[in-house]
Structure formats: C-alpha cells, structure tokens
Image (tube, rainbow, N blue to C red):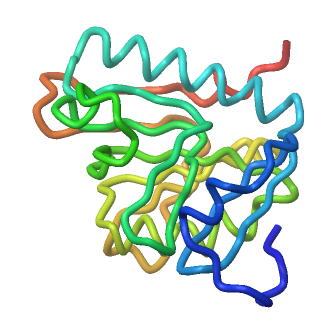
Amino acid sequence: MSMPATQYYTAEMVRSLPEDGNRYETVHGELLVTPAPRALHQRVQLRLLLELGNYLRDQPIGELYASPADISWTVDTLVQPDLFVVEISEARTLDWTRMQTLMLAVEVLSPSSARADRFTKRRLYQEQRIPLYWVVDCDAESVEVWTPEALFPVVEKERLIWRPEGAALPCIIELAEIFAPI
C-alpha cells in the first residue's frame, strides 16, 4: 500500500520511522507501507529461502538475505526485498549501504503489497538492472519472471530456473513443492 503523496521521503527519513510492525520503504520518494505478511506468504518465502540457500551452498556465487534489509541506490530509494542474492564481495562487507549489486530479487505478494511489488518496485529493479526479479503469487501458484528489458513477465507455473553468472549448474525450483499445502 502506498501513502498519499503529501511528502517526499528519503531513505534516511524512512530509517527514522518508528518500529511498529509495518515495513516502510520508499521508491523515488513515494512511501510504501506494508503490514506484517500473512502466514501463506511466510510459508512460501521460507520454502524459497531453503531452496535458494541449498543451491548457493553448492554454488557459492552469491549470498542470500531475507527482509528486513535496507537496500538503497539513491537518497530517495530504500527497499526491503523479501529475498535477495548479493554478490559475494559486497556481502562480505556486512554493510547494507555497500550491498548494491543484487543478482536476484524476490517479492512474495500479499494483498497489501501487490501493486507496489508488481509495478513500483518492479520498475525500480529494472532500472537498477537486477538480472532477475521474481514476483511470487501464492494465490495463483505462479511466479512472474522479470528481466531488466522485459515489457511483460514470463509467468511460470511449473518451475523456476535461475542461471546466475559464475555458477556451474542452474538452480531449478519446482513450484509444486513451494506451493504444496502443509
């Protein structure tokens, strides 16, 4: 959900907001506020985290992180992708301000975040030339796969295949396992 455009927000302003259980982000000065995610979101995010973590353990070409995080490229931008992979050299700094090169960004949709994730943040990730952006739709049991040049996503319903630079093997994630009931 986005707030009315009554104020232009910077990353520093967002960092100073109270910790009240909401996630605050800003994209080009627009404040995005998201409440705590629903349980389905958390379950799918955790399953993706485990799959990506196992892959990166075997193919150590990047470091996997989960939100909350402060990823910022400009003074008026601060985002917290649900999951993201950063180049090893930047990850070793253990400093959010130095983590600029995301290899993969993942947002798991919630009813309150769908517009921002599909449009506002997607455009930002494309502007930043993030090679791959996954928009995970738990209700549709599908994933929109975006690249920097894409005008429309490729919608995957069976599997995700990630071929990061420097990896010997691709990461293959079966969506039936990600979306399987408890």
- Spot the residue most to the bottom: 6
For the residue pair 76 and 151, the one nearer the viewer reads as: 76
Q: x, y (%) of residue 76?
A: 50, 74
4 up-or-down from 153: above or below: below
Residue at position x 76%, y 28% in the image: 42
The C terminus lies in quadrant: top right
The N terminus lies in quadrant: bottom right
Whether residue 10 can be seen here: yes
Whether residue 170 can be seen here: no
Query: Where on the picture, by quarter, is residue 165?
Result: top left
Residue at position x 30%, y 55% in the image: 131
Query: Where on the picture, by quarter, is residue 54?
Result: top left
Quick check: 134 left or right of 114? left
Residue at position x 52%, y 67% in the image: 122
Tally of numbered tags:
0
Q: x, y (%) of residue 119?
A: 62, 74
For the residue pair 98 and 123, the one nearer the viewer reads as: 98
Q: x, y (%) of residue 130?
A: 33, 58
Quick check: 132 left or right of 90? right
102 up-or-down from 128: above or below: above
Q: x, y (%) of residue 115?
A: 74, 70
